[in-house]
Image (tube, rainbow, N blue to C red):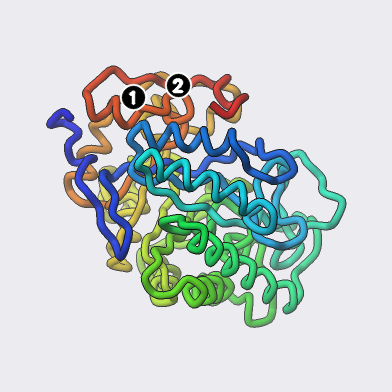
Amino acid sequence: MTAATDVLFRPFNLKGLHLKNRIVMAPMTRAMAEGGLPGAKQAEYYRRRAAGGVGLILSEGTVIDRPVSRNLPGIPFFHGAALDGWKQVIDAVHGAGGKMGPQIWHTGSTRAGWEPELPVESPSGLVGPGDARGRAMSEEDIADAIAGYASAAADAKRLGFDVAELHGAHGYLIDQFFWDGTNVRGDRWGGPTIKDRSRFAVEVVKATRAAIGPDFPLILRLSQWKQQDYSVKLAKTPAEMEDWLGPLSDAGVDIFHASQRRFWEAEYPELDGEDGLNFAGWAKKVTGKPTISVGSVGLNGEFFNAFRGEGSTASPLDKLVARMERDEFDLIAVGRALISDPSWVNHVRQGAALKGFAAEDLKELA
């Protein structure tokens, strides 16, 4: 370990979660689970990253027990027969000395080039402002979805996972309740403010906390931006962020996973300058809870370039180290760099030359 990066290798402890370093493998959709069932290739994929030094692995998004809860056919389930495969995964990760949690999601009414047989569901039957897709959820649908999140997290605990993460970001179901562009409901699940529209997420967190008990760590991933509109900002001021995150913290979130496209950008530069707190920094400031930052770590461009088939050379980690040294956030999630180099964390620790990201590596699970 070099002095320049030793801050990344401090242990982190929360409840029963004991991590050897501050580096998290970010959830990345791979959509290679045949029939929605993970198996040996997923177990080996995650095992290699555990062996490569990652402190905490978060799986790709895994869907709850709801019809049409995924937007690609190869996305894995986290219910039913799929749980046998996830038991194989967590045992492999633990065997390599790693820690892991599933990311639990429902993709709502988002599009991904795949049309399911049944209509998709969302708060108001919208995928974006004025853009109709699927159907609006009934009270029964909402109750069943809340129960689905809680059940999946309880199964994660039962299988031996170390944490669970709820996905509330990027324009998927929970986020579609947050966003006034997709939540125009006139009942208790909607409303004019971000605090009003957070009711669904709060109830998901409460139900999940009741299902997993007080001592199992629960992470919630959030974003300001949406895949439908990168410029959206749910909380335009720190006060609005407090209104948004405070009830979620009170409901039982232990760690906020604050997703940005570029982690080094200030969330409110008009308040504290271009080098001011990023999203994770503000989330930590307004809630007092630990946070994970994420967004193009180790890349010379942003991770979205991968969706255009572009690779990236390795980028220096000085901006990351500087923010970690001032305790702006507690953990950092790394994505594409770990696709191309499963041992990226060990190479950082050793001070070795780092690989960039090659887009062709997305074509297989290796």
98 w.r.t. 81: above or below: above
Q: Secondary structure at mark 1?
A: loop
Circle 1 packing at 10 Å, graded few (<14), some (14-19), many (20+), is some
Residue under circle 1?
315
Residue 332 visible to an observer of this rendering = yes
Q: Amino acid at mark 1?
A: Ser
239 w.r.t. 90: above or below: below
Q: Toward the viewer: 224 or 115? A: 115
Q: Is residue 146 left or right of residue 289?
A: right
168 w.r.t. 245: above or below: above
Name the quadrant containing residue 320. top left
Q: Amino acid at mark 2?
A: Ser
Q: Toward the viewer: 287 or 355? A: 355
- Label tally: 2
Q: Is residue 342 left or right of residue 61?
A: left
Question: What quarter of the picture does the N terminus occupy?
Answer: top left
Residue 195 visible to an observer of this rendering = no
Residue 169, image x, y percentages: 53, 55
Q: What residue do we see at 74% from left, 43% from top?
A: 35
Q: What residue do we see at 70% from left, 40% from top?
A: 74
Residue under circle 2?
312
Residue 24, image x, y percentages: 37, 44
The answer to the question of whether label 1 and label 2 lie on touching residues, with beta carbons closer than 8 A, is: yes
Question: What quarter of the picture does the C terminus occupy?
Answer: top right
Residue 300, image x, y percentages: 39, 25
Residue 238, image x, y percentages: 35, 64
Q: Is residue 185 left or right of residue 242?
A: right
Q: What residue do we see at 66% from left, 36% from top?
A: 32
Name the quadrant containing residue 131. bottom right
Q: What residue do we see at 62% from left, 40% from top?
A: 39
Q: Which mark is residue 176?
A: none
